[in-house]
Image (cartoon, rainbow, N blue to C red):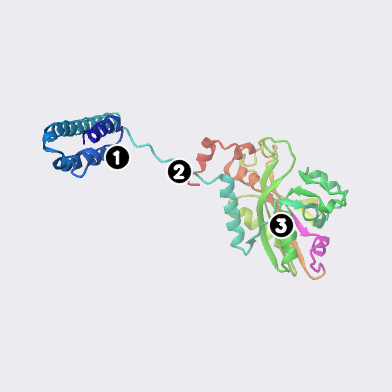
Amino acid sequence: MLERVKEIYQEIEHFDVQTKEQLEQFRLRFVAKKGVVAELFDSLKQVPQEDRRAVGQELNSLKDLAQQRFTDYKATLENSQEETASAVDLSLPVVPNQTGAIHPLSLVRQQIIHIFERIGFSVADGPEIETDWYNFGALNFADNHPARDMQDTFFVEKKSEGSAADVLLRTHTSNVQIRLMERQKPPVRAIMPGRVYRNEAISARAHCLFHQVEGLYVDRNVGFKDLKDTLYHFVKELFGKDTQIRFRPSFFPFTEPSAEIDISCLICKGKGCNVCKYTGWVEIAGSGMVDPNVLTNCGIDAEEYTGFAFGMGIERIAMLKYQIRDLRLFTENDVRFLRQFEGA
């Protein structure tokens, strides 16, 4: 019995109590009515009569030690909690939650989609890593066409058997138009928003990564007036009814005839600034009637169907709408800039 008492002494001495859970474990082990100390008292009647007095004294000392240690540990933990609580200044104001804001490019993209969806356009998507055929060839770009130089391309893989199999990062979302016309016969009416890539020097007006939205409408008896009416409606809805619009003749390999669309500069109100190059007008889109060769490449009868297409940069639209003068702000993730669009 005395050997067992000594073991419990050692156990109490080495029991570490740092938390409430450990204190409770100590109580259940040594102080509770069903603990090891209580069990030893129950076994006292089995000790010979001549040794019972000495063993009883040792048990009383063990019980007192366990109770004293429990009391000391409990007081230490309570004092520690009070010190921690007193260190908290409850008079301090609550730290407000910082909520995020939708990125301005996402805002403009949503607005563009909503405008075109209301007049019957669906939304289509396609791969950003593309073959030369879908990015250039099917769009009437010959292998040596000078228009290829207008779009400095990031090539992923150059194939030896021919340029049509080259793998690249798409330079426009027109590749989605080709894929859409391949799998869906007219009527086709859709817009294609997405990221595009061009190997350009980054400046206030240009970036190697930007966003476009292109549109396509192919059906019987589609004319240039349908294109003009669609884009007039879009500009008035997005920028306001007082916005001036003009069409300028242009050239694109995949449309004929082709036109560029300008609107009156919303930043300087036509007076002239660095964004409009002091002309009072800003180009926002390219457009035109789909070239018959493009329809034929997609398996559509160019004698029966006609169509129009257009494309615009979302960054350019956002710059005009929110009067932002530097394109780089969209990708620098400056919280001060992005917070301006909370609730926009």
Q: Which residue is mark 1?
A: 21
Tally of marks: 3
- Please tell me whether mark 3 or mark 1 is closer to you in this view: 1
Q: In the picture, residue 220 is in which quadrant?
A: bottom right
Q: Label 3 vs label 1: CA separation?
A: 63 Å
Q: Is residue 237 magenta?
A: no
- Please tell me whether mark 2 or mark 1 is closer to you in this view: 1
Q: Earlier in the sequence, mark 2 or mark 1?
A: 1
Which quadrant of the figure contains the N terminus? top left
Query: In what element is the residue under mark 1?
Result: helix
Left or right: 85 with respect to 202?
Answer: left
Q: What span is colored magenta in the figure?
A: 287-302
Q: Which residue is mark 3?
A: 176
Q: In the picture, residue 277 is in which quadrant?
A: top right
x, y (%) of residue 40? Answer: 19, 40
Q: Residue at x 78, y 54 (%)?
A: 258
Amino acid residing under circle 1: Glu
x, y (%) of residue 170? Answer: 73, 49
